[in-house]
Image (tube, rainbow, N blue to C red):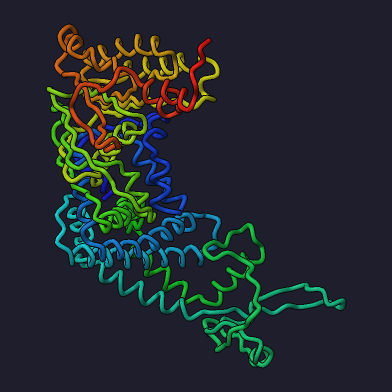
Amino acid sequence: MKNFSLLYPQNEESVSVPLSEEAVNDLSVEYICEKLSGDTYDRNIIRNIMIRIESNPAVIRYRRDVFDDIYHYPDLRERIKELLDELAYLKELEKSVKDATAAPIWQLINRLQELDIYVNCIAGINESLTEHDIHSEGLIQLREYVSSVFNESGFEYLREDVKGLVSEIGQIKSVSVGVNLDSRLCPVEVGIVSLNDKPFTKAGLIDRFLDFANKKDSINGGEGFSGITKIHTVGKVSGDDPLMSNLSRVVQEMLGSTVKQLKNKLSKYANVSCYSLTKLIPEFIFYIRWADYLEKVAALGIPLCKPEITDTANREFHAKDLYNFKLAVQRVEKKDFEIVCNDIEFDASKRIYIMTGPNRGGKTTLTQAVGLAFLFAQCGLYVPAGSAVLSPADCIYTHFPADENKTVNLGRLGEESKRMSRIFEEATDKSLLLFNESLATTSFAEGLYIAKDVVKALRYLGARTIFNTHMHELAMMLDDVNSNVRGDSMVVSMITGIHDGKRSYKIFLAPPEGVSYAQDIALKYGVTFDQLTKNKTASDG
């Protein structure tokens, strides 16, 4: 099980690339990860998996099927969560077991703890996976592995030996320490008086001390002692601590036969490696946290689907009832509004969309929704849609308005142009490109001039693209682009609609409405002629 993974199937090559810092920000990956878990460790795990875009269809299907199993069996998730705590402790324990400076008795006890957790986890995973009708290749292989360990003859002996040793060692609850004083009552010598089967209490402490009998391998009865001050962290007793080192040596001497028995029994399992399972901790966390959250989304009646993954060469995407996942997050947080879903397709006849529409009409929301759908699908998760068929993108490139602090040296137009140039250097026809109000920070004439060449380059490249813009004039030149620029992907006009004078947030394939975004801006800020001259009386000069 050395190289086993629930993210990467054996004998399949991973084809993954990291998302750019801009894409991580534009797709709100950090925001989404924060919603999944309040634990920093968990969030970092989820983020690190999500920001690497996997494009091998076989790897994506493998992940998708593992997630599907984990999502469909909540009780399986709960059992794995319990085991994750033990596996996490096992991972920490590994450091102590390998610590050469620790006292020999503590090395043995740490190894015993290690084997005890290993036995419990193997048994727990075997029981959980055997009880469920799982279908994913990843979980079936994990079940086969733990079942083979669980059912082999040596495991039952290991289980019994560990159980007996844990019970025996567990009897020791406290140590009586004797201190010799000099004439000034200063401590000059310290030694262990006895090992006891109960913690100390104040009551009876002196009596038990006076009744002490110094017999090796004997354990005296004792009571708990409230107010005992902790002097060492459990798990490691190193030579750097003289007091604890000496105490460890004396304990080992007093438990001579017990230590010998412990060493003899554990030596039989020297070759048992307990840490292969700990490598699955991040992967289980990723799947479980997502399954828990998407269960909340589904409970609200918001659509989610298991995507169909096709070959990358198809460069297709067909989604019904697609929406931006950030809207689902808001609904989970008790915000009451209707999520508007849309259908969208990428194929040879419509692979590059020039999207126009009114200000605040949903262009940015839809652009981001498409990016998140690809990101979720290629991570192996359910897609925020009613149904989805998707050819993986080799990467997702975004071009959203930049932070003003990042445009100081080049200016906004220079910075936007530089980022756009870099995208075209790296992107292929199998990429996903998302442009959000690109070139809107310069003059309309300058922006339109550059945008025309960008659209021609998009036709030539052939990558799936959404280019949302206020430049309605840009969408009017698409017949010319499709006729005069070589390429196998059609550029089409898409608009966000208005129904009964209100924004519908629905999209349509249609020519642009209006001649420029200026009309929307003018209306928004009240600077049309009618708005400016309302209630004013014309002067005769």
**Quarter where residue 50 is shown:** top left
Res. 116 image quadrant: bottom left
- Residue at image position (35%, 58%) is 274
Taking depth in this image into account, of 423 and 386 the one nearest to the observer is 386
In-front residue for pair 71/502: 502
Residue at point 37%, 65% (across, down): 117
Q: Work out which residue is located at the far top of the displayed protein and give it.
A: 484
In this rendering, position of residue 8 left or right of residue 214 = left
Residue 166: image location, x then y, percent: 41, 74
Q: Answer above or below: position of 179 versus 41.
A: below
Check the image and report above or below for 159 versus 303: below
Q: Is residue 47 above or below residue 291?
A: above
Residue displayed at 66% across by 78% down: 227
Q: Nearer the viewer, residue 426 or 494?
A: 494
- In the image: residue 184, left or right of residue 323: right
Residue 257: horizontal and vertical position, in percent?
Answer: 47, 77
Q: Would you identify the image quadrant in which residue 471 lies?
A: top left
Q: Is residue 10 visible?
A: no
- Residue 147 position, x and y percent, is 20, 62
